[in-house]
Amino acid sequence: MAKIKSLDDLRMMKESLQSKINLREKGEDPGSHVQIKVAMATCGIASGAKTVMEFMMEELEKRGIESVITQTGCMGYCFAEPTIEVKLPGKEPVVFGYVDNKKADEIIEKYIKNGELVDGIIPMNYETIE
Amino acid sequence: MSHIKVELKKEQVAKIKDICKSFNNEAGELINVLHKTQESFGYLPAEVQEVIARELNVSVAKVYGVVTFYSFFTMIPKGKHPISICTGTACYVRGAEKVLDEFKRILDVKVGETTPDGKFSLSCLRCVGACGLAPVVMVGEKVYGRVSPDGVKDIIKEYEQ
Amino acid sequence: METIKLTIDNKPVEVPAGTSVYQAAKNLGIDIPVLCYMNLHDLGIENKPAGCRICVVEVEGRRNLAPSCSTTCANGMVVKTHSTRVINARRTVMELILSDHPKDCLTCPKSGNCDLQDMAVKMGVRNIPGQAYAEMSTYKTDFSPSIIRDMDKCIMCRRCETMCNDFQTVGALSGVNRGFSAVVAPAFEQDLEKSPCTYCGQCVAVCPTGALTEVDHTPKVIRALADPTKTVLVQTAPAVRAALGEEFGLEAGTSVTGKMVAALRQIGFDYIFDTDFAADLTIMEEGTELLTRLGKHLSGDKDVKLPILTSCCPGWVGFFEHNYSDMLDVPSTAKSPQQMFGAIAKSYFAEKLGKKREELVVISVMPCLAKKYECQRDEFKVDGNPDVDFSISTRELAHLIKEFNINFNELADEDFDRPMGESTGASVIFGATGGVIEAATRTAYEIHTGKKLEKVDFHELRGMEGIRSATIDFNGLPINIGIAHGLGNARKLLDQVRAGKTNYHAIEIMACPGGCIGGGGQPLHHGDTSVLKARTKAIYSEDTNKVIRKSHENPYIIKLYEEFLGKPMSHKAHELLHTHYFDKSSKDIFI
Amino acid sequence: MAKYKMHVLVCGGTGCKASASDSIIEKFKSELTAKGLDNEVQVILTGCFGFCEKGPIVKVLPDNTFYTQVKPEDVAEIVAEHLVKGRKVNRLLYVDPKSNEHVSDSKHMGFYRKQIRIALRNCGFINPENIDEYIARDGYYAIGKVLKEYTPAQTIDIIKKSGLRGRGGGGFPTGLKWEIASKNAADQKYVVCNADEGDPGAFMDRSVLEGDPHSVLEAMAICGYCIGATKGVIYIRAEYPLAITRLKIAIDQAREYGLLGKDIMGSGFDFDITLRYGAGAFVCGEETSLIHSMEGLRGEPTNKPPFPAESGYLGKPTNVNNVETFASVPVIILKGAEWFASIGTEKSKGTKVFALAGKINNVGLIEVPMGTTLREVIFEIGGGIKNGKKFKAAQTGGPSGGCLTEKHLDTPIDFDNLIAAGSMMGSGGMIVMDEDDCMVSIAKFFLDFTVEESCGKCAPCRIGNKRLYEILERITNGEGTMEELERLRNLSLVIKDTSLCGLGQTSPNPVLSTMDNFYHEYLAHVNDKKCPAGQCKSLMQYVIEPEACVGCTACARNCPVNAITGERKKPHVIDTAICIKCGACIEKCKFNAISIK
């Protein structure tokens, strides 16, 4: 590791290291970020939830959106897997069904960035099985 | 302080000298030297202190004065399994005294003594900082938490064979 | 110099910056009691651990009481030295100290001369609350040949530790243990005999209680005197006469030689002799040794060791045996005057009396505690019979005189007995730092140059400086002389010699401050070093008043050589008057 | 580099380590590898979370799940359920004692709700053995900023304005202390960190050093810059091996990064830190003792002045602060003096860490704003008294402190209020006592400690504390008199008034404070020969109630000293002169006929 020779060096280093603990910092204070829960029970995993989760993590970071992505149990909409729940700061959570990478991209661009609704919302009448 | 007469072997003297040297034979490093030496010998018999005094160029009386000031240093060899009972305040209010009494009773030694077979030595220490587990007993490096007087014999049993 | 203005007990006072409250109060005539505090100003030794807390005072605006000995005056300070709060605190602390102190004042050797006892009297302590169940800190009493350590009586003033370490650099003592069992002791709390102690007795000289006292040989003196089969000889060292008077209320610096002799005669000693006689003899031997070594050195002999070191001080001998075992061949081999006296008394004088050495008891009166140890060293015995049977201190002699109900101050002066009571001015000054080397110079100069000295006084060799040096012109040959008193100073000088950084021909060393006049067996100076100066003055005026002032002119010394010894450094002289030294450094005793 | 989706934080503090947190980590790693998740879930060893009562603690992020009392056997389930399937393991969640509900987010636990973590900000959050994590949390940014933007005087000014006071016990204003040290000119000065936490029952310094060592290093460098010192020394208890190891790692890493050593961040400022070990002497918490100990001497104090700021380590100007004080410094620089000063009370700013222990439900390390009341600490954070017993007293300030009682419950805790209440902040130990604790015995316990730890240099402390102890022993043995009670008070006041150092000046506090607050207990011991709490063995009497005794002889047969006599089927009697109060009879009596009076 190169020595830190100036305050700028330190600043740059901090930025590069930020991601190491970002997950923790945001997790401590999820309310102020976009929170995304990916249903990751057997049904979800079977339908490709894992791929979607990875895609979203990558894309959100690329597009500079502060978000907390967690996995959760089955939301009870196995017919619509993979399902994800998105909660924008200060808004009620919204659940999307049949999410693949393309759908995920649309959710990010329209709903998360601009608050526009997209197709595939499942009415809220479930409770996460914790 | 009573102590045991020991004869140091050449390599033991060399070892002490090495330790002193690693601290540049500086008198100000006496406490660090004593720590390292005790780590290596298990205790600090008079003869060891004499070598250290000579190497650091301080009087033996001064070295002894320092050894007897700090409770961490001992001139008596510890048992194979040193038992320490935390008598910090948190442990005290949660019954450390009764636990200590039980150890004294079963091992038939006083605090600061070693059993005749050299297996156990008993000492008290002030707070290992595991107050959540009070009362705490340490055997060697192992920490036993929430020890009750009844549990004492089981702890001793673990090390008996 | 900056001055500080403050108020003590409603009186304004102005003192130089850095003055302690204790000193400022003293300037005003206010006496604040102290126990642990000790200031040996001339020696540069100040002991102020601020541990006894007896000297506490109230300082306005301060939360707690302040120890006046180590609190520096500040501008505008308002101090109360004897308020109710202070008196209550002082008395309570005193009760505490006494609660951990034995109450055997009746038999304590320090009784009547004890700072703690005085303080208890002053404060009117009548009972010690809770004494019935108060645990006392107890320790094994340590009987060494010179010093008794009864640490049950230690109050942790640390004066002894300061003297042993800071002034003497002997390092025999240290504070050990912690809390209630804290005490000053040698390593491993072993006896002094197993420590590097030199028995210089400076610890005893400053101890405010009975914790450190000399081994009392007065009972042995009385028993010897009471034994009709024994002939009892006493020798008195030069410094004794300059201090003994203090024990009888005489002003420090009063020379009491004649009264002392009269008292000794009244007590019943058979022969009252003078160690000064043996001091003259020492000069003959040591001076000759110096000239011999010097001669060899000048003729290019590389094996000869210079400088030559004096060897009459047993504390100093013990010190170099412990610390300079690599230099054992440097000191003069001449025995100390005490031992020369004993050797001659039990040979030459015994022959004269027609008695066997066992029938003689030789007692010395010394300003010194190390002499007690010296006379029982094995090399100073013949078939187990010591040349000097035992040694008592100036203080013990004073006790004896009082015990024999002698009105000391009213005694008419008397003279020492012959032959071993005759002495010169040179031998008297053995008692002060620089004196031995001055005496040696007087003799060596005349022998070496064959000329008479025009001026006998060598003022360049005198003084209270810890380390001094001077060059004396021996008729064109410059002789470099070094002097040190106090073993800490000796160490500094010796380290230079060991490192080869000096060009001294001769060095005098005395273990005690000011030389023997400040010895560990002298009347207690209670921290007042002006006493030492007064004694020194007395010694030098004694010298001036002597008719003969050079050792080699002592007629009885001349006679001794003619009748018995032959000449200095002869075979017989070697046998009786010279010794050798032992390596007492702790070696690698390990397998 | 693996892109982790989840972090599992495992507490590696001494308390949790004692309960096998090491094997918990091992187990996580092996389970995750077995499930192929080792690249998705990162397992991190952290410093103490504080909630030691419920340790070992495991925290899963980002879903902020706080598992308590985790055993190695539980790990497989956490991995399979939570980490793979996203289902929290309910049985390991904290159960709120009031609502009986599971709480997974620590913020919603009573224990954490009122806490503000400044000194402990990184404890239980970052891996203390990894400097990168500290840097990612703005680590070393404060020293960088100070070196680049502020003069030493400006920096000292920030600390002064923040109102930070020493957390080691005395509460001396830190900025002022630095200023004094900065004004004493010398060729060499020293910054010393006092990490010789000797107060039994306080372990906040250890937690900071174990959980966030870099913050202390950074603060020491800042202090060095302010006072003009290039050398720092941490004086740490040898009894803290884990903290020592982590400090050594931290120092090495900081040197490697150029954050300690020569020319830090191109500023031209040099600063390096070495370690010195304590060896078990409470008195070394006193600055002058500590300095003597650092010099290889007996840790005896010397009279002040001169203060260390004038003549300290090796005779040079030295600034000594404790761990917690230092740990608060970098945040103050980063967030500003105003921010820090906005927390706390008028004269005590910021937060204070307390080690909560004793008869309390939630033992642990807490950090609360100055001014939090004792009630909030004990009943909200601490979860109340164990086993539903009644609160009696809280002892603060350790052996130097005093006790707070019911009447102090609503007093805001800060430096000055504690002193006014007859106690002190000390290093922040807080031991809670319930109705079963005898306050005379508690005073005796603390005196026992002081007697053992007194250095012996000054007479009042060396002898006086021993005498105090003896009187207390007589009182607890039922031998005390009223005259002795009086003496106890006078002796206490004189010891405080005349002792040389802080140890003796405060050692009688537990006596005075218990006498002030529980004088009736003293009187009961002295006059009635009774111990109201039933703790003092000598004052107990075993009595057989004749009405309840059926004369079964079980007690008499089991008495080891034959103190019980009586005919079969008739009530028995205990001879109290013989009875050794072993309790064997009570155990054997099936009729509850034997009681202790």
Image (cartoon, coloured by chain):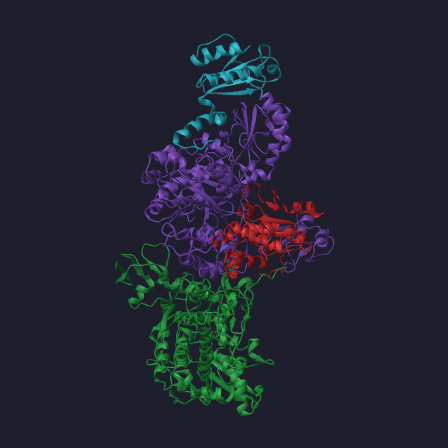
Chain colours: A cyan, B red, C green, D purple
Q: Quadrant of residue C118?
A: bottom left
**D364 to C156, vertically: above or below:** above
**B34 to C395, vertically: above or below:** above
Residue lying furthest right: D568
Place of residue D52 in the rendered image (x, y in percent of width and height, measured from the top left): 54, 38
Place of residue D277 in the rendered image (x, y in percent of width and height, measured from the top left): 50, 48
Residue C227: in sight, yes or no? yes
Q: Quadrant of residue C495?
A: bottom left
Place of residue D249 in the rendered image (x, y in percent of width and height, measured from the top left): 51, 38
Of C563 and D386, which appears nearest the observer? Answer: C563
Q: Residue at x 48, y 31 (%)?
A: A1
Of D581 and D404, which appears nearest the observer? Answer: D404
Residue lying furthest top: A119
Count every numbered label the image shows and give the total: 0
**B95 to C484, vertically: above or below:** above
Q: Residue at x 61, y 32 (%)?
A: D26
Residue D596: in sight, yes or no? no
**C129 to C272, vertically: above or below:** above
